[in-house]
Amino acid sequence: MPPTGPLHLGHLVGALDNWVRLQDDHECFCVIVDWHALTTDYADTRAIPRFVREMALDWLAVGMDPERSAIFVQSDVKEHAELHLLLSMVVPLPWLERVPTYKEQQEQLRDRDLNTYGFLGYPLLQAADILIYRADAVPVGEDQVPHLELTREIARRFNHLVKPIFPEPKAVLTRSPRLPGTDGRKMSKSYDNAIFLSDRPKQIGKKVDSMLTDPQRTHRPIPGDPSVCPVYATHEVFSDADTVAWAAAGCRSAEIGCRDCKAKLKEAIVERVGPIAERRAEFEASPDTVRDVLANGAERARRAAGYTMEKVRRSLHLGKH
């Protein structure tokens, strides 16, 4: 994940919950990709160190275990940059230009000059992040499958042109439930509609109170349609089955009002996020622990990355004079 701001509930249910489960059966490398943050935020990098630390806190708080997973910062493992450079020698330019998000983000982020090689080449850096560990699987959402397919093509091309070193990583698709933000759009810090993992109960309560509901239900006696209500969609993710059924039936029959529905949702979110906030506060009070986790994770990553790079250098006849 790039450290571009605080993590929210969408990150929790869309990625982190799955990452925590994957630790049970896989050797995991979890990277805070600070170089990737530069691809869009290169004009002002002052917040990146704070965002790196905040992301590490969130990961540890949700249950990422440094005993089972290497948790580290990308720029602490220079081999990522070296492999990115070497792969750039063999990857055709049109492969990068056809990545779907390349033009999409240029349209969405018109306030930034993204006509840089760094932005064009970020899928190649992403491929290096994966291939450096010779990963056989990568957890992604469906929107990231084209990026992973590019990584597979890059591995195939290198293996064919140079030497078979890299496996072609498979996608471990994460089933991401629909989680709207407070305004009904996809939850995103960019839209200012997110509930963050670091939010306190009062902040969560205020944000839930501000959530949009069925626009046709302008008064309490009017029955609603749960299928168009962001509050109900969030209940489906965070509430138990009985509460979800109560919210749906009560909305359709107008037996409950939107305030009643929101009150139950606040309870469900606080119950889910509360333990995360407590663990986060414990790690926040121990900055040395967080630094040690990142340092130890980087050392473990450097060993694995260094082994790969020895193979890559030899295959390209580099380093022998």
Image: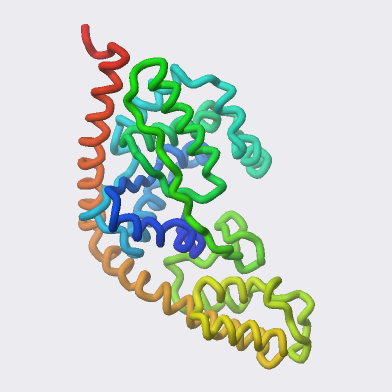
Residue at 56% from the left image edge and 47% from the top image edge: 143
Residue at 30% from the left image edge and 56% from the top image edge: 23
187 lies above or below 93:
below
Locate residue 231 relative to residue 274 in the image: left or right. Answer: right
Question: Total label count?
Answer: 0
Q: Percent from the top left, x then y, of residue 307?
A: 22, 30
Residue 88: image quadrant is top left
**Which residue sits furthest top?**
321
Please state which of residues 222 and 208 is positioned toward the viewer in this rendering.
222
Locate residue 42 relative to residue 300 in the image: left or right. Answer: right
Residue at 61% from the left image edge and 71% from the top image edge: 233
Q: Percent from the top left, x then y, of residue 142?
A: 55, 49
Q: Percent from the top left, x then y, of residue 98?
A: 61, 30
Residue at 32% from the left image edge and 35% from the top image edge: 134
265 lies above or below 294:
below
Residue 168: image quadrant is top left
